[in-house]
């Protein structure tokens, strides 16, 4: 039996580059301002998170292989004082299986939604194009990095989404 809370549970997906992390001119990678604290706040509330990010499909034949290569690439140039929170994402690191699946093609968002059961899904990224595609596929979109707006969709709003049944 599925409860209303389970059906409405939010799952928050992110783009990686220039959303959660920043790559400097020298190639080093760090958290974007507020990203580490935001991930901690979601974790503290038990809200699952995932990544929807473009990497070369040649990085592996499975999502797990491509995710492992992504982690290796990020970790090898990481400059942050705390490591990137890979453990928060579990197996919710979605990457293109083919070059045709690269964003802005809808395939990665469709896979994320299918893997989220009846939960409401949120997508946060820095580009208008990506948040528009996510919105068209039923995600609650949020564009990060906009002036005069919170850096990320406020955690309280994400929690409220979990109290309403998905559309």
Image: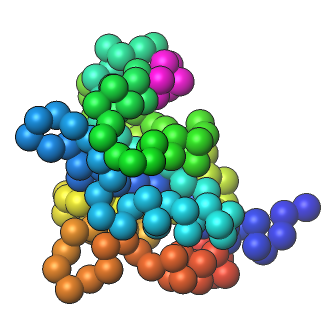
Residue 166 is at least partly visible in this image: yes
Residue at left offset 16%, top offset 80%: 147
- If the image is split into quadrants, where does the C terminus sit? bottom right
- If the image is split into quadrants, where does the N terminus sit? bottom right
- As for residue 132 lying within the magenta part, the answer is no
Q: Residue furthest front?
A: 81
Residue at left offset 22%, top offset 37%: 28
- As for residue 65 lying within the magenta part, the answer is yes
Left or right of 50 on screen, residue 108: left
Q: How many marks?
A: 0
- Residue toward you, 141 or 149: 149
Residue 143: % across, % down: 27, 68
Check the image and report above or below for 98 versus 29: above
- Residue toward you, 35 or 61: 35
Check the image and report above or below for 125 versus 22: below
- Residue toward you, 36 or 98: 36
Applied colour scheme: rainbow
Residue at left offset 19%, top offset 74%: 146
- Residue toward you, 133 or 5: 5
Residue 107: % across, % down: 39, 40
Q: Residue furthest left?
A: 25
Q: Quadrant of residue 130?
A: bottom left
Residue at left offset 30%, top offset 64%: 33
Left or right of 22 on screen, residue 98: right
Residue 106: % across, % down: 34, 45
Left or right of 165 on screen, residue 67: left
Numbered range of the magenta stretch: 62-68
Check the image and report above or below for 117 versus 75: below
Residue 17 is at least partly visible in this image: no
Magenta stretch, main secondary structure class: helix
């Amino acid at each position: 039996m599925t409860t209303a809370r389970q059906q409405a549970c939010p799952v928050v997906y992110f783009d990686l580059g220039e959303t959660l992390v920043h790559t400097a001119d020298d190639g080093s990678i760090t958290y974007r301002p507020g990203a580490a604290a935001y991930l901690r706040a979601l974790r503290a509330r038990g809200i699952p998170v995932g990544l929807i990010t473009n990497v070369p499909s040649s990085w592996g034949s499975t999502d797990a292989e491509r995710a492992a290569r992504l982690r290796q690439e990020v970790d090898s140039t990481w400059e942050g004082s705390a490591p990137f929170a890979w453990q928060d994402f579990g197996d919710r690191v979605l990457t293109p299986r083919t070059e045709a699946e690269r964003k802005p093609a809808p395939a990665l968002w469709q896979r994320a939604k299918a893997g989220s059961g009846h939960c409401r899904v949120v997508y946060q990224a820095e580009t208008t194009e990506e948040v528009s595609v996510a919105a068209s596929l039923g995600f609650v979109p949020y564009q990060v990095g906009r002036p005069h707006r919170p850096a990320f969709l406020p955690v309280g709003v994400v929690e409220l989404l979990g109290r309403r049944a998905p559309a």
